[in-house]
Image: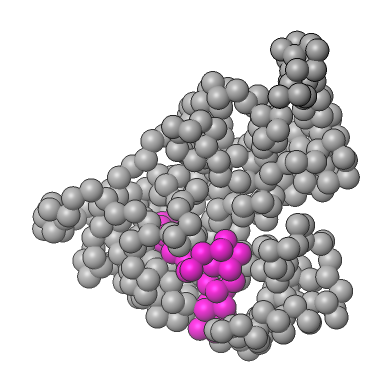
Amino acid sequence: MQSGVYLQVVDRSSRAARIVDMGVSAPLATIPRGRVVDLVGSDLLSFEATADPSPDHSPVAVSVVIDRPMSLARTVDDVVRALAAAVVDLFPTWLLDDESPDPPGYLDPATATRLVRLVASRSGHSMPALTVLTQAGRSGRLRLGELAPETLARECALLLATTYRRTHVCLAVTRADPAPDDADPVPDAWTLDDQRVVATACEWLTRHADVAVCLVGDPLPAIDRFTPVPWATPSADAARAVETVDADDTMGTGVSVRLPAVSGRPHPASVAEQRLHAYLAQHVWSSGARWNEAFAPDPLAAPIRVDIVWPHARCVVEIDGDDHRSVAKYAADRRRDNMLQLAGYTVYRFTNREVLDDVSLVADVIERGLRGRIGAAASAMTAAHPNGEAHHR
């Protein structure tokens, strides 16, 4: 249990005055590597909506949600462990090159060893850390042994950047919101000591993992040593879910890492997406599916990321978790659907539970929808060119 004395509302007028003349908010790409900045006016939902999809020159944004800070060493260890768990969930993507269309579900020991040596030969990688993470990916069990947290943190940052094809990582550190039905909810604010621990942990991450760190949602109101950067809330149309990877030890700090989707792959932390991907891969009719790719359904629209799209059939499939039942997500989903439909796409939505309960039934709906779209397009082409004029043009 934490102390019963909690930080009350503080006067932030002096801090606000420091950003009056800073102009419009800076894009994600301008958050400096190796430093901690405070994104004033941000919240986790708006940050994640802005960060995915983001321009290719931006860092990959990984959210780090902390529940209850403890000692500095324990907080750092739990953050690094959660990052390692996220990297393991991405296995074996970071061992494979761009020529591999789909990572196999299992790598034999000889192949894994060869790939580890190949990746480790590149600048900056740690052979011991890479070996530990590969063993965890193959076994499903993360055992860190005597691996130093500094070494593991840097290797995790390198592998995350590699997986998302970015130059580096930006960790968005925020405070966990209490669950509505939580019997022992977290307090309204961290204590001053809690904030000092998290602030120092953020600085540790910038030094040892060579990442950018931004504070999202004002988790450290009493700490004023970090550069404030204004953050503009994006359109609600961009709201999008991300998946969560929890640290193994629930008695610790309580850290979860939220990852964006990996372009071209089912989300590594989504069991429903993985299940549907495995099922569709067995059927020829599903060929042409693109997973989690950002695209603009209309030339004038900002890019969005959808779970699956068949561009040739102009068909989109979305797999919704429980968070999509919230008012904000539900409204954002309707706006996205309307935008896609106006651009000529058919949108099918399924819940995680539907996919996990009967993936064949979900696939049957998708197959009938795809065949219907392709058949309608062929009929329209025939009607427009009944004498085969299209063939001769």
Which quarter of the image is occupied by the C terminus? Answer: top right
Residue 332 rendering spot, x and y as whole percentages = 48, 31
**From the viewer's perspective, is residue 364 above or below residue 147?**
above
Q: Quadrant of residue 310?
A: top right
Residue at 38 percent across and 56 percent down: it is: 28
Q: Is residue 232 left or right of residue 285?
A: left
Residue at 69 percent across and 52 percent down: it is: 265
Of residues 248 and 233, the one drawn nearer to the viewer in this rendering: 233
The colour scheme of the drawn protein is: one colour
Residue 391 rendering spot, x and y as whole percentages = 77, 24
Q: Is residue 344 visible?
A: yes
Q: Is residue 374 left or right of residue 186?
A: right
Q: Is residue 234 magenta?
A: no
Q: Is residue 129 left or right of residue 171?
A: right
Q: Is residue 146 left or right of residue 301?
A: right
Of residues 1 and 320, the one drawn nearer to the viewer in this rendering: 320
Q: Is residue 171 magenta?
A: yes
Residue at 23 percent across and 60 percent down: it is: 228
Which quarter of the image is occupied by the N terminus? Answer: bottom left
Of residues 185 and 315, the one drawn nearer to the viewer in this rendering: 315
**From the viewer's perspective, is residue 301 above or below residue 214?**
above
Q: Which residues are magenta?
A: 150-176
Q: Quadrant of residue 215?
A: bottom left
Residue at 54 percent across and 67 percent down: it is: 161
Residue 313 rendering spot, x and y as whole percentages = 71, 29
Q: Is residue 220 visible?
A: no
Residue 122 rendering spot, x and y as whole percentages = 61, 83
**From the viewer's perspective, is residue 81 above or below residue 340?**
below
**From the viewer's perspective, is residue 243 above or below residue 181?**
below
